[in-house]
Amino acid sequence: MASVELKNIGKSFGKVEAVRDVTLTIADRELVVFVGPSGCGKSTLLRMIAGLEDISTGELRIGGKAMNKVPAADRGVAMVFQSYALYPHMTVAENMGFALKMIGVGKAEIEAKVRAAAAVLRLEGLLDRKPRQLSGGQRQRVAIGRAITRSPDVFLFDEPLSNLDADLRAQMRVEIARLRAALKTTMIYVTHDQVEAMTLADRIVILNNGAVEQEGPPLELYERPANRFVAGFLGQPKMNLLPATAVAAGSGLAFRLTPDGPAIAARPASAGLSPGDTVELGIRPDAFTLTESGGLNASIVLVERLGGSSLVHARVDGLSNLVTVELPGTYQGTPQTTIRLGVAADRIHVFGGDGRSL
Ligand code: ATP
């Protein structure tokens, strides 16, 4: 059993407040991903859990035990870093067993643990190789193997796939998901890559400026972002964020992007708004549809053909920024074509002046 509890955790480096008042409970066997832009404090938070960084304020408990003052080696955690940091003169097996050897575990037990980890990671055929004889993905698997042999209560991953190329990242993402199913251990995974966060996490914690913006299951965050930061961060291609003004429409409100443009219905359209208020409408690229009549009039500027889908960048009449529209790969439109963009009211997010979702 190893839940991880963070209570009002904060960290300052001199005047820099890297982490501010983070309170979270990570359940036993849960895989939680900390994600956010560079400098948001995600690595610092992980390093405090690992015991590699002192905690300035707040309380950390692992498996119910207070950990603030417990040395890293005694916390029951194992960390996998972005740089694999393997010993170049040792074989794969020696690298994976080294930490156990250092604490005096017997040879037979080390060998058994290395074999078991190698089987999970499909490294059996590589145990006698040196790190220089391995690919980047294999080296990262050895680094993970080194953590597995220690049988930790909690795995901590700090951007483990950042050094790999796109193909390998995708492969290793699947490996980590598989590993997770096999190991059934609590895992905390730090990344700036929202695809990794979406695909791996039971729960995502989105950090910005050292504080939690929102936490929850991936699809919940994707479908119901609490604010424009979360909305813009999750989802690829990014959500279109379009400044708009609330206007009276029947007994409720609608929104106009430009004074002469059409009134756009959005649900919820919404609490506390009055005609004349400025908001931002959030529309994901795949929420747009092409319509024959009504909708927004736009002109295609560029089409990126990805095969399965095409990303159409279009200028809506009266707007200076382009919107991105995701259409099927079979779409034939070319630059300068005029199109009409429809969007269902329930696929529009409305963000108030303070950036919060309404
Ligand atoms: P990245 O994705 O770039 O690694 P991150 O989200 O992991 O970013 P952190 O490394 O946790 O961010 O850093 C958070 C903030 O704390 C940053 O502003 C960083 O400059 C600052 N910081 C981190 N370590 C130190 C340190 N040892 N001394 C001073 N400031 C630090």
Image: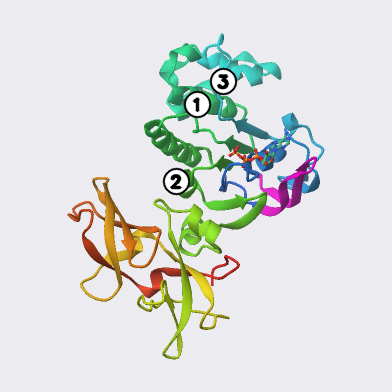
Q: Which residue is mark 3?
A: 96
Between discs 1 and 2, the one toward the N terminus: 1
Asked where in the image residue 323 lies, by quadrant, the reply is bottom left
Across and down, in percent, residue 269 comes to: 47, 79
Across and down, in percent, residue 213 comes to: 61, 57
Neighbour tally class for label 3: few under 14, some 14-19, many 20 plus, Cα within 10 Å = many
Q: Which residue is mark 1?
A: 140
Across and down, in percent, residue 328 comes to: 24, 55
Q: Amino acid at mark 3?
A: Met
State the CA–CA distance, disc 3 to disc 1.
Answer: 12 Å
**Total numbered badges shown on the rendered structure:** 3
340 or 326, nearer to the observer? 340
Between discs 2 and 3, the one toward the N terminus: 3
Going by the image, does 48 lie left or right of 325? right
Q: Is residue 20 magenta?
A: yes
Name the element at disc 2. Answer: helix
Q: Is residue 71 magenta?
A: no
Magenta residues, start to end: 1-24
Q: Is residue 170 above or below residue 358?
A: above
Q: Indicate which disc residue 323 carries.
A: none
282 or 21, nearer to the observer? 282
Q: Which residue is mark 2?
A: 195
Mark whose residue sits in front, 2 or 3: 2
